[in-house]
């Protein structure tokens, strides 16, 4: 099955700086890569996603890039704000429509 | 917009007791997933249902069972509870029809086993 690795496990940035979280996957047939933000005590919320037929997608301060050849994808948050502090999970969906989550990155934005 | 509804939000049980969690998916979503998330862990897939039939099975203990009803809501039944079952349990739904792949999570049910 699919194996998703996520780095770093923790990340601290100053407010206004950028944050980058990286994930790798093993199954070249995976074709959908969502990113979830989970605040304390809440369920994961989809913030952005990318499909295998595109290389980059942007939504305001958030962007995701995908390198299918290298089998890695990254989340980029620019102009970080304290409310961006949360745990972020990447995921890959395989041909069986099964989700595989990364181990999460705890992002802290320091005011 | 309507979201995934889970109940109860919090549940406290003793060891060896039984617990039932309920999930109401987003309207017109025909697929339901159950996940277990321990402290500091990523969500672990338990089981999923598509059109009221079990579609995939993950790391669900034999003490747990689940089903999806005709109105698409789902229930996760947990028996002979153990201390290690204490976790957040998330339900997620997806519009499998059309295969968009998007997964929408509920707010979770926090189970504490004493």
Image (cartoon, coloured by chain):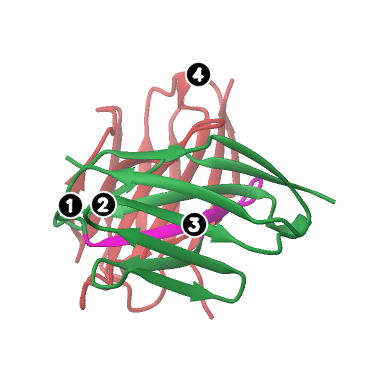
Chain colours: A green, B red
For residue A12, what is the image quadrant?
top right
Cα separation between marks 3 and 1? 33 Å
Query: Can residue A93 be seen in the rendering of this structure?
Result: yes
Question: Which image quarter is the C terminus of chain B in?
Answer: top right
The residue wearing badge 3 is A75
Cα separation between marks 4 and 2? 24 Å
Residue B110, percent across and down?
Answer: 57, 40
The residue wearing badge 2 is B48
Q: In the rendering, which numbered label is found on residue B54?
A: 1
Q: Residue at x 40, y 66 (%)?
A: A49
Q: Is residue B84 left or right of residue B110?
A: left
Residue A90, percent across and down?
Answer: 42, 50
The residue wearing badge 4 is B83
Which secondary structure, mark 4?
helix
Q: Which residues are magenta?
A: A31-45
Question: Which image quarter is the N terminus of chain B in?
Answer: bottom right
């Amino acid at each position: 099955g699919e194996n998703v690795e996520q780095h770093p496990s923790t990340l601290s940035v100053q407010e206004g700086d950028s944050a980058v979280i990286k994930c790798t996957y093993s199954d070249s047939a995976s074709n959908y890569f969502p990113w979830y933000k989970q605040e304390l005590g809440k369920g994961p919320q989809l913030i952005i996603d990318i499909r295998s037929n595109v290389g980059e997608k942007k939504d305001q301060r958030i962007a995701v890039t995908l390198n299918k050849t290298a089998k890695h994808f990254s989340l980029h948050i620019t102009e970080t704000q304290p409310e961006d502090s949360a745990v972020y999970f990447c995921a890959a969906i395989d041909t069986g429509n099964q989700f595989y989550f990364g181990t999460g990155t705890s992002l802290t934005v320091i005011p | 917009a309507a979201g995934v509804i889970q109940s109860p939000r919090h549940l406290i049980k003793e060891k060896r007791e039984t617990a039932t969690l309920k999930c109401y998916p987003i309207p017109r979503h025909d697929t339901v997933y159950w996940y277990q998330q321990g402290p500091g862990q990523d969500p672990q897939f338990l089981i999923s249902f598509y059109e009221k039939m079990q579609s995939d099975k993950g790391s669900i203990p034999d003490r747990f069972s689940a089903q999806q009803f005709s109105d698409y809501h789902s229930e996760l039944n947990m028996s002979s509870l153990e201390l290690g079952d204490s976790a957040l349990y998330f339900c997620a739904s997806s519009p499998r029809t059309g295969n968009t792949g998007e997964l929408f999570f509920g707010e979770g049910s926090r189970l504490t086993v004493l």
